């Protein structure tokens, strides 16, 4: 009977080792998945705020002459870069100026790198890059 108990305890130990590995994998997915989602939300928020910052850069000379308010592309690029450098953690960004219905808008795309803490133990890459994007336009007080 002693031999039988020893072999049974070996089976239980093997089962527990496999089960604990599975539990650790699930915890790792939940933890790093939530962290990556937080990074994605941060990237979207940074892109939105940077686009708003760039959208406030109005071409004053054109507006003073009585023309419609338009975004000054050079000043907007600088405002976006300044905002994102102050925010920190941004890997890189792109700024474009699409024209929608005759109106120039500013579009900002931000990339952030998330460093995984636990999934690297299971063969996943240690980092993931997430991208946030936002578009803003110069608003006027008149309809």
Image (cartoon, rainbow, N blue to C red):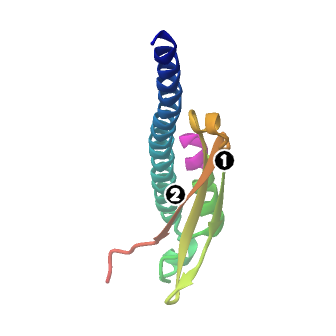
The residue carrying mark 2 is 47
Residue 119: horizontal and vertical position, in percent? Answer: 58, 39
Q: Main secondary structure of the magenta part?
A: helix
Is 17 left or right of 125, judged from the image as shown? left
Toward which corner of the image does residue 107 lie, by quadrant? bottom right
Whole-percent x, y for residue 47 in the image: 52, 57
At 59% from the left and 62% from the top, the residue drawn is: 109
Q: Residues within 10 Å of mark 2 (few under 14, many from 20)?
A: many
> Which quarter of the image is occupied by the C terminus?
bottom left
100 in magenta: no
Nearer to the camera, 21 or 47:
21
| Image quadrant where residue 113 sits | top right
- Left or right of 6? Residue 73 is right
Q: Secondary structure at mark 1?
A: loop
Question: Is 86 included in the stretch rendered in magenta?
Answer: yes
Residue extending farthest top: 2
Q: In the image, what residue occupies the spot 63% across and 33% down?
A: 121
Instruction: Inspect this view and state whether residue 59 appears.
Output: no
Q: Decide which of 107, 28 is in the foreground and name it.
A: 28
Q: Residues within 10 Å of mark 1 (few under 14, many from 20)?
A: some
- Vertically, is 50 above or below 36? below
Residue 19 in view of the camera: yes
Q: Looking at the image, which residue is at 49% across and 43% down?
A: 29
Q: Quadrant of the N terminus?
A: top left
The image position of residue 30, as x and y in percent, is 44, 42
> Which of disc 1 and disc 2 is earlier in sequence?
2
**Range of residues picked out in magenta:** 82-89
Which residue in the structure is indicated by mark 1? 91
**Furthest residue in direction bottom, as rendered:** 101
């Amino acid at each position: 009977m002693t031999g039988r108990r020893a072999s049974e305890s070996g089976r239980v130990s093997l089962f527990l080792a496999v089960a604990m590995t599975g539990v650790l994998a699930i915890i790792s997915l939940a933890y790093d998945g939530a962290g990556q989602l937080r990074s994605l939300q941060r990237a979207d928020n940074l892109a939105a705020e940077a686009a708003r910052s760039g959208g406030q850069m109005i071409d004053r000379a054109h507006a003073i002459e009585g023309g419609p308010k338009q975004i000054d592309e050079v000043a907007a690029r600088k405002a976006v870069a300044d905002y994102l450098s102050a925010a920190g953690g941004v890997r890189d960004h792109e700024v474009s100026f699409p024209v929608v219905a005759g109106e120039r808008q500013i579009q900002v795309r931000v990339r952030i790198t998330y460093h995984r803490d636990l999934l690297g133990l299971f063969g996943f890459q240690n980092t993931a890059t997430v991208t946030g994007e936002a578009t803003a336009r110069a608003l006027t007080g008149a309809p």
